[in-house]
Image (cartoon, helix red, strand yellow):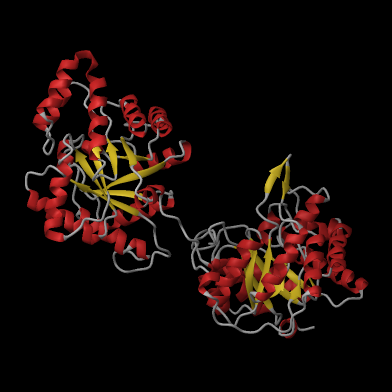
Amino acid sequence: MNLLEILNQKTVLADGAMGTMLHARGVGFDKCFDELNLTNPAAVADIHREYIEAGAELIITNTFGANRYKLSKHGLQEDVAEINRAGVELAKRVVAASFRDVLIAGDVGPLGVRIAPYGRVKLEEAREAFVEQIQALADAGADLIVIETMSDLYEIQEAIKAAKDVCPLPVIASVTFTRDDRTLLGDNPEKVAHRLVAAGADVIGVNCSGGPSQLLRILKQMRQAEPNAKFWVKPNAGWPEQVSGRIMYPADADYFGEYALQFRDAGANIVGGCCGTTPQHIAAMKKSFELSPAGAITEISIFPEDEITAEPEEQPTQLAQKLANGKFSICVEMDPPRGLSTHKLLAGASLLHDSGADVINVADSPMARMRMSAWAVCDVVQRQVGVETTLHFPTRGRNLLRVQGDLLAAHALGIRNVFVVMGDPTSIGDYPEATDNYDLVPSGLIKLIKQGFNMGVDHSGTSIGQPTNFFVGAALNLCPQDVETEVKNLHRKVKAGADFFLTQPIYRADDGPKLIEAYEAKHGKLNQPILAGILPLVGLKHANFLHNEVPGIFIPDEARKRIEAAGENSAKVGVELAVELIQNIKGWASGIYIMPQFHRYDMVSEIIVAVKE
């Protein structure tokens, strides 16, 4: 039987899992499943027999890990040829006894080691290992070679080359994907399809990964990329979970039966099951094919746009959604710790989140003082507190290389809100002699993110693989000494693509409308939301310092008098003043950006609760 000729006539039904079936029979995962071809061939043969009786037209040999690297972990590296020959021979005996036309695929899995350029094993060494295994499978009489569950394109390309070098058998090349529809090394289905076809595989596809739903989506993407290829699909029975010490898979046989037809209609030429699937799953798929027969697969070149998405769609951040819906948003700034401990920071973040804060803003080296990386703090807060964060991203002290690398790092950590600022000069901080050169001003960085990274390219126009999804904020001074310059800077940031603005602290409700009117008189309506800076006053000394020594801050006489009259209760009055101000700015502000002083998170909590009442 010639596999490729058969595939021109119908969809072939393959078998299901071998490893999980052996495990269900009491074989531990720490054992060498491939060695069972020699030590317990009856167990392997029984599984082959059950799949054939269920309707499988193609079975895979029990040789998934029978290469020199994986076998060496069990001291069996000298038995590569013997184990692979035994795997094919016992499959042939089962097929002969069944009196059915069943194809035997010699199974080749990953080597279990990293190969160059991501590991120490050289490409030629990897190919030698594949040649050794595939030669044994071909010599023993396999009808085809299936290279499956691969995640490294370099590795699978070497396996395909090895198969083509040593035998004329058809080659199936199949890759596994993670939950984000990418390989472990970050390759998407389109790239995988192109590479497998270019490497010379006769059939390409996807196996393992998740359940049928995910693999149907990936199949469509691969077929859109290579519409003339032949495809193989073998999904897991859903994502595994551990129950009472056992690995369980949720997808039942009937579910697989339903998906069998969808796989066939989407262009799959070979359909089967992977981890967690059983003869019952294969029987259900066989039944579906019998009830809904189909002719030869027709070639198509494209799928409707609503049926295929090149990348899993990422939702806007919670902050972006809330601002877009016109809901008043509350952000609170926190400084990273100066040492290793994050306990106090997490306690404060938990209090703020429980009080109703929507986002925790994490400053980056405020006042140019050495602190823990803001990236790490954002990651810890999001994971352990469960609240969204905004990363402060100063341009000062970063060249183009570091800026872009840091952006990729932030995105990889799941950080999507970014607040772009110039940053404090090192001359005022702990290390005044430290370099604070920079290649980009804030508007330039905003443009790089919004018009570069969020479009999938870096500053040079080179692809970064997929677009980022940053929601970008910028700084705004509502009380500038030079209004004209501030309006000019604001317009520059708007044109660069800023999504929202955070302001310096204000203490007068009419500060916002004045600057907004000045801007709109020159440039038209300002559509970006503004989150007004709120810095609660703790006492008279604090108020006088801010009013007299911090540029851009003006505290009305009435407010300072109320603070002074409060005496020991000045912090309470500071809360009252903040709440009153917030209520008065809701006409023009889309939210607030609270900056706690002296780690008084209790004051901020009171403000949030009062504002939300």
Task: Describe residue 393's horizontal placement relative to residue 95 as left or right.
Answer: left
Say if residue 575 shows up in the picture.
yes
Up/down of 327 relative to 297, above or below: above
Instruction: Measuring from the top left, give residue 151's x and y in whole percent.
Output: 58, 62
Task: Describe residue 265's horizontal placement relative to residue 48 as left or right.
Answer: left
Quarter of the rendering containing residue 137: bottom right
Which residue occupies 34% across, 45% down?
Answer: 390
Instruction: Measuring from the top left, give residue 573's x and y in whole percent.
Output: 23, 22
Quadrant location of the C terminus in the rendered image: top left
Quarter of the rendering containing residue 110: bottom right
Residue at the far top: name it.
Answer: 568
Which residue occupies 13% across, 31% down?
Answer: 555
Quarter of the rendering containing residue 428: top left
Quadrant location of the N terminus in the rendered image: bottom right
Say if residue 17 shows up in the picture.
no
Up/down of 573 relative to 211, above or below: above
Give the camera-side residue of 236 and 575: 575
Instruction: Measuring from the top left, give residue 536's x and y in whole percent.
Output: 24, 29
Up/down of 500 relative to 158, above or below: above
Give the camera-side residue of 294 and 99: 294
Instruction: Measuring from the top left, give residue 585's x and y in whole percent.
Output: 23, 40
Give the camera-side residue of 15 and 304: 304
Task: Describe residue 569's horizontal placement relative to residue 100 as left or right.
Answer: left
Please give the count of numbered marks on the rendered protein: 0
Which residue occupies 81% across, 74% down?
Answer: 290
Up/down of 106 relative to 446, above or below: below
